[in-house]
Amino acid sequence: MAHLFEIPELLCLVCEHAQRPDLARLLTTSRRFFECATPVVWRVLPASAPRILLGLLPDADSHPHVNLSLIIAEDLIRDLQPLDAQSVVRFNIYAAHVRRVTRSQTRQSNIAWNTLLKLIDARPILPNLQSLRVSLAVLDRYIRRISVQVSILSIEPYLSPDLVEIDSTHDSDRYYYMEPQTLTQLVSRIAQVCPRLGSLKLSYSTGCTDVGHTGDLSQLASSLGRLHNLRAVRLGFVILDPEVLVALGSLPNLESLSVNESFTHRPWPGSDEALKIPSAPLPDTSFPSLWHLGINLNDGFELVHYIWGITALVRRLTSVSMHVFGGVTCTQICDFVSAIRKSSPLVTGLYIDCTKSLPIALFSPEVIGSLTQLPLQRLRLSGKDTPNNQGGGDHRLRLEFPSMEFLQIRGYALSFRDLAFIAEHMPKLQQLLVPVKLDVNWPSKHELHPLNLTPSLSQIRFHFLSAGTTQRNSTVASSEIPQEEIEAIAAGLHALWPSCVACVAYQNLRKDPKVSWTGRVNAELERLREVDGLDNTRTDIVPTYFSK
């Protein structure tokens, strides 16, 4: 009889469904299992990657400890010599399977990575790496500027012809800036080594000096123009330079473009640096594949007016996202939506994130009125409710979108009446991700009939994004909720979406051995559908935030 871990079909099933820690413990079960599971276990390494990789080398405990001070550790690392070929055999076996790695700039991470890079002299150190996530935020003489040396040295050991993604949009990089010369040299090096690169997302504030001047960007434009496989780009104001715009517009596969407003410098209106519409329009053939545009605003909306004045850039868009880090008013949101309606008529997906700004009434009549002018199918609204609305007030949400398929709301708790309005006016809704007030205002089973609800025929997947409260319990994350409250929640949802509604809790319940409260709600929903003679089968819907 064949050993279980020698049957290829069984091994494939185990590798597909088992958790990575379990697979790691089973690696030595058989040679065939090792060959099958190793690529799965080592494909993506966590932030502790350098320490994991150091553990593959001889005498790993003798290397500089990550808890040493950086000065002492650097002195010890400086004296290290590269290991011979025999000593790195084990490292090479596993390193060849790594496809994604994160290079952070913490003290412990820097010590571990610098040690590893000194002991292993092969470049690239991970020969088959496809995705590099790296932070470039290292202080240069106490100035929040990313230097040429730091930026290139941080990514040079990982660059390879197989690399398809470079992402340095780490939160710690948000308050740093990269001067044009630094950015130009960095992108030039990337273009030389990584011709297949498909995604380039650099730090939040790239392309500005400490006084805001951009200088000559022709070399940067030339380097970007050579990366013909680019599908996603995220940079700073340099994107809006005429030469850079032309280069990006010529890329045949560019689908997503994000512009970041600098935290360190902003051109003031009326100054010589103020944004102006290009005198010569871009060719009509520019940006042939671009469907998503993202903008990150720190102060003011001049960037919005500038971008939506470039017709060739925005006319084919089907998806737009905006993250606001400074102050914002309802009028500015309405102006933003109006610009989309006039210049990007094909937009069906919109994401507005104001969680990092001051509280704003995103559900005010003026904002909702402007949103309803767009043929939206996917909408994400994130913010912080204004004090006037935190006390509740049923029926605040009056979004009427007959074509809406995906709706996500964060920062605003919805009532049962809000859900009833959604069910009535969004007949095509498939995904609903919202915080819900499961309080005393949630109707009991006996209170539903007098409400004259209009049920929806759509099948939806319902994500509870916040714990909320139930009538008698402090949190709905507990599995100790009385059955009558579970039945009330299920009855209300069934009354709104009788065809099918499946509930998912936002909390990670994988480690909770108890039955989740949403599981109990789903069981009650299935019972109600059986009582009504409805089909309990449904097709799982994968959330789609932005799509064509």
Image (cartoon, rainbow, N blue to C red):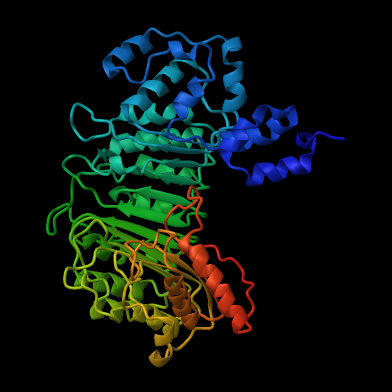
Residue at position x 24%, y 30% in the image: 139
Q: Quadrant of residue 383?
A: bottom left
Q: Is residue 501 at least partly visible in the picture?
A: no
Q: Is residue 415 at least partly visible in the picture?
A: yes
46 up-or-down from 114: above or below: below
Q: Quadrant of residue 89?
A: top right
Q: Looking at the picture, how far across and down is residue 351, in whole percent?
A: 36, 64
Residue at position x 44%, y 40% in the image: 166
The residue closer to the viewer here, 10 or 376, is 10
Name, please, the residue furthest toward the right.
1
Residue at position x 25%, y 60% in the image: 303
Residue at position x 41%, y 35% in the image: 188
Q: Looking at the picture, how far across and down is residue 125, in whole percent?
A: 51, 24
358 up-or-down from 37: above or below: below
The residue closer to the viewer here, 431 or 83, is 431
Q: Looking at the picture, how far across and down is residue 227, in whole percent?
A: 49, 44
Q: Quadrant of the N terminus?
A: top right
Left or right of residue 357: residue 14:
right
Left or right of residue 170: residue 57:
right
Name, please, the residue furthest toward the left.
270
51 up-or-down from 380: above or below: above
Q: Looking at the picture, how far across and down is residue 205, in whole percent?
A: 27, 45
The residue closer to the viewer here, 163 or 311, is 163
Left or right of residue 275: residue 155:
right
